[in-house]
Amino acid sequence: MKDLSFLGTLRTARGVPRLRWEPTMTTPADMPLRRFAIFLQFACCMLPFAFSPSPLSAAVPYQPMHPDPVVEAWRWRAFPELRGLGLRCMAEGKDGSMWFGADDGVRRYDGRKWTAYTLDDSLLAAPVNCLCATRDGSVYAGTGFGIARFREGAWRRVFPPDGELRWPTYDLVETSDGDCWAGTMWGALHLDRATLYTTQEAGDVLKGRTPGLQISILPNEAIPIRWDGLVS
């Protein structure tokens, strides 16, 4: 029977198998077994690395999931005070109060109480088609007859300053320079400079009807205007 003592003995260190080889005198006939012992020792050393994650292996990066704030129910609040009023537009004032344009006028909510503004409060007309809160604390309301402004606790007529000519206003916006512009049935109105950008035909109709208004003529295709029923 062959002497296999050159294969060494199998020992453990802290529970991890380890093959310890102690050289002995061998013969040429024992060389294959010696080579096998060396291979077995190498395999036992590499075994822990074979089952451990490789630092070079590809990994899926962690991507945190953020919920869409638009669909989170706790962010939304219903106002029963606006039901049945025909809500048309809204704006946030400089002081954080919310303004709502409705069929019968304007509603203001300061976080605690509601205030209603109608024709009895010097609002130019109703319904209110658009609202614009500006940086100076004013709130503009566009109606079918023109534009009114709320400032220092009261509504006042802004445009047209007088007369019976209707100025249906459908949009109001404050530009970066602080000026207010209005999209009206007659054209684009630069409110702070009392300048209307409109077509030649509309300009001819408006001459003499709105004193103090400057008219700048644009090509017909630039501003599609319809004033059926506005002028008798």
Image: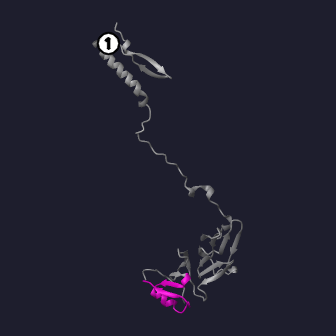
Q: Is residue 204 magenta?
A: yes
Disc 1 marks which amino acid? Thr
User: Residue at left 44%, top 84%?
Assistant: 218
Q: Is residue 189 magenta?
A: no
Tell me which corner region of the image, top left, top right, bottom left or bottom right, holds residue 30: top left
Q: From this viewpoint, is residue 128 visible?
A: yes
Q: Quadrant of the C terminus?
A: bottom right
Across and down, in percent, residue 223 comes to 46, 80
Tell me which corner region of the image, top left, top right, bottom left or bottom right, holds residue 115: bottom right
Across and down, in percent, residue 148 comes to 62, 80
User: Residue at left 46%, top 18%?
Assistant: 11
Tell me which corner region of the image, top left, top right, bottom left or bottom right, holds residue 127: bottom right
Horizontal placement of 223 versus 67: left or right? Answer: left
What span is colored magenta in the figure? 191-219
Q: Give the camera-side residue of 147 and 14.
A: 14
Q: From this viewpoint, is residue 229 visible?
A: no
Q: Residues within 10 Å of mark 1 (few under 14, many from 20)?
A: few
Q: Give the camera-side residue of 92 and 127.
A: 92
Q: Give the camera-side residue of 30 and 87.
A: 30
Q: Quadrant of the N terminus?
A: top left
User: Residue at left 30%, top 16%?
Assistant: 31
Q: Which residue is mark 1?
A: 26
Horizontal placement of 5 versus 110: left or right? Answer: left
Which residue of the protein is positioned furthest toward the top in this rendering?
1
Identify whether 105 is placed above or below 8.
below
Across and down, in percent, residue 173 comes to 55, 75
User: Residue at left 65%, top 78%?
Assistant: 151
Q: Considering the numbered disc 1 on the image, is that residue within a helix, a strand or a loop? A: loop
Q: Give the camera-side residue of 56 and 98.
A: 56
Which residue of the protein is positioned furthest toward the left in this rendering?
28
Identify whether 88 is placed above or below 39.
below
